[in-house]
């Protein structure tokens, strides 16, 4: 079982913020991105072509972007996987309080038929690993992020937790965990329904979501486990308007532990990892363990068993200054909790959303050590923010 599953499955969601330099004069643009049938497009990318000012639409397809005055004559690019990318001049959009409706047209580019020798999928993956240092975004910047986790007992909500936080990004800490600073959080807990069980995300778990950065550590799909996987070339496709190579993977038949099955997308031009979609492999799910070490011993002492029924992960990266950075993630996990001593037996569903909402390259000063969250501390133990209502539209 990987660290992501062990930590109760992380979750996160969408806030929309513009990227702007401090004290700059700017113009705020609000809009909604839809398809031709007026269905909202969530996670569409909106950004100034010549700069790192960018954001993503929320679940309703809406966004807010603050653009400094010096970029008013630049082009604004709007893109979404499977749709044609369009560019608009910011000065041509309605300002501030007005809502701009932006309609994208579907792209019907089919996948090309493979008529040549099939590439070695494992070698493609290893080449992508070798190119990580030149493909990953390492500029000094402050990354604003948001997460939401919902835990349900059957159909009844048990726990809702949300938080906004910042990570400090710099090439100087490439092989270390980025500092995390909590901005705001709230938790709502039904103590009766949780039956004394604890749910929540630690600061360490935040890092495990960035698969590319963690690929040489003990996170999901780490290089140490590659020998236990079968990789398969699945052809080529499109991702955010870019040609990609599709690699399928599943654990070897003889492996007696729980690993994953899914699809990896590689940018064809740079061999960068751009998307992961996977879940526990049916071959190994019977070996899945929710906890290990001290936690496993504690559950045994409490006569509590936790069974993993299934899970799904979708993790996306986006291009920024010709490199790639984590964009957003969605998770879903199905568990069963049992205890004869405490007389409960119920299904539990944990769903989550995460998004890097803004990357501010003008903020190059490391966080004060007094503001940082300890690596293994659960965010749930941090104080709630009074009047914390900014998430209401998301």
Image: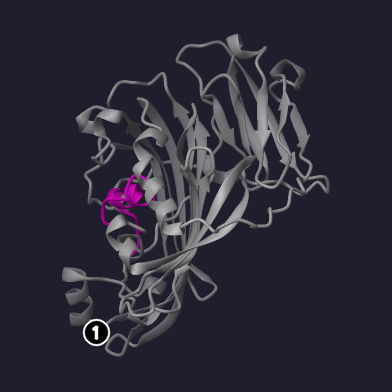
Could you tell me which residue is drawn at 45 percent across and 15 percent down? 22
Relative to residue 126, is residue 75 drawn left or right? right
Relative to residue 369, is residue 154 drawn left or right? right
Name the secondary structure under disc 1: loop
Q: Which residues are magenta?
A: 199-220
Could you tell me which residue is drawn at 39 percent across and 47 percent down? 127
Considering depth in this image, is 319 or 203 the residue closer to the camera?
319
Could you tell me which residue is drawn at 76 percent across and 39 percent down? 104
Looking at the picture, how far across and down is residue 226, in whole percent? 33, 61
Q: Which residue is mark 1?
A: 303
Considering depth in this image, is 249 or 161 the residue closer to the camera?
249
Density class for disc 1 (Cα within 10 Å; few <14, some 14-19, many ≥20) is: few
Q: Is residue 360 above or below residue 244?
A: above
Q: Is residue 40 above or below residue 230?
A: above
The quadrant of the rendering that contains the N terminus is bottom left
Q: Choose top left, top right, bottom left or bottom right for residue 299.
A: bottom left
Q: In the rendered image, is residue 240 in sight? A: no
Q: In the rendered image, is residue 242 in sight? A: yes
Is residue 207 shown in magenta?
Answer: yes
Could you tell me which residue is drawn at 60 percent across and 28 percent down? 47
Looking at the picture, how far across and down is residue 294, in whole percent? 16, 69
Relative to residue 75, is residue 179 drawn left or right? left
Is residue 160 shown in magenta?
Answer: no
Can you name the residue that lies furthest to the bottom here?
340
Can you name the residue that lies furthest to the right here?
37
Relative to residue 43, is residue 358 drawn left or right? left
Considering depth in this image, is 272 or 170 the residue closer to the camera?
272
Looking at the picture, how far across and down is residue 197, in whole percent? 32, 71
């Amino acid at each position: 079982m990987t660290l992501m599953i062990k930590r109760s499955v992380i979750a996160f969601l969408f806030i929309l913020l513009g990227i702007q330099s401090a004290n700059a004069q700017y113009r705020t643009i609000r809009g909604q991105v839809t398809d031709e049938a007026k269905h909202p497009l969530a996670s569409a990318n909106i950004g100034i072509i010549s700069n790192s000012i960018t954001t993503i639409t929320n679940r309703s397809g809406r966004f807010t972007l603050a653009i400094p005055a010096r970029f008013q004559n630049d082009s604004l690019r709007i893109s979404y996987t499977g749709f044609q990318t369009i560019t608009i001049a910011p000065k041509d959009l309605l300002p501030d309080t007005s809502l701009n409706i932006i309609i994208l047209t579907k792209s019907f580019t089919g996948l090309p038929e493979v008529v040549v020798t099939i590439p070695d999928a494992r070698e493609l993956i290893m080449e992508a690993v070798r190119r990580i240092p030149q493909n990953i975004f390492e500029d000094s910047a402050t990354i604003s992020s948001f997460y939401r986790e919902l835990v349900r007992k059957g159909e009844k909500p048990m726990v809702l937790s949300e938080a906004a936080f910042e990570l400090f990004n710099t090439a100087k800490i490439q092989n270390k965990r980025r500092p995390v600073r909590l901005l705001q959080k709230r938790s709502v807990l039904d103590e009766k329904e949780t039956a004394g069980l604890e749910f929540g995300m630690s600061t360490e778990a935040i890092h495990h979501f960035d698969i590319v950065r963690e690929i040489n550590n003990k996170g999901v799909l780490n290089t140490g486990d590659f020998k236990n996987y079968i990789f398969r070339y699945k052809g080529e496709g499109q991702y955010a308007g870019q040609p990609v190579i599709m690699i399928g993977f599943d654990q070897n038949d003889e492996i007696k532990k729980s690993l994953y099955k899914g699809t990896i997308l590689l940018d064809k031009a740079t061999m960068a990892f751009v998307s992961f979609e996977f879940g526990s492999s049916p071959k190994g799910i019977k070996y899945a363990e929710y906890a290990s070490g001290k936690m496993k011993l504690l559950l045994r002492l409490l006569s509590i068993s936790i069974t993993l029924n299934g899970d799904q992960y979708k993790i996306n990266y986006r291009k920024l200054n010709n490199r790639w950075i984590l964009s957003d993630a969605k998770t879903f996990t199905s568990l069963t909790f049992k205890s004869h001593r405490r007389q409960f037996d119920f299904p539990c569903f944990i769903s989550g959303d995460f998004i890097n909402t803004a990357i501010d390259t003008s903020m190059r000063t490391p966080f004060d050590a007094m503001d940082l969250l300890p690596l293994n501390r659960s965010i749930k133990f941090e104080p709630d923010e009074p009047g914390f209502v900014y998430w209401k539209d998301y």
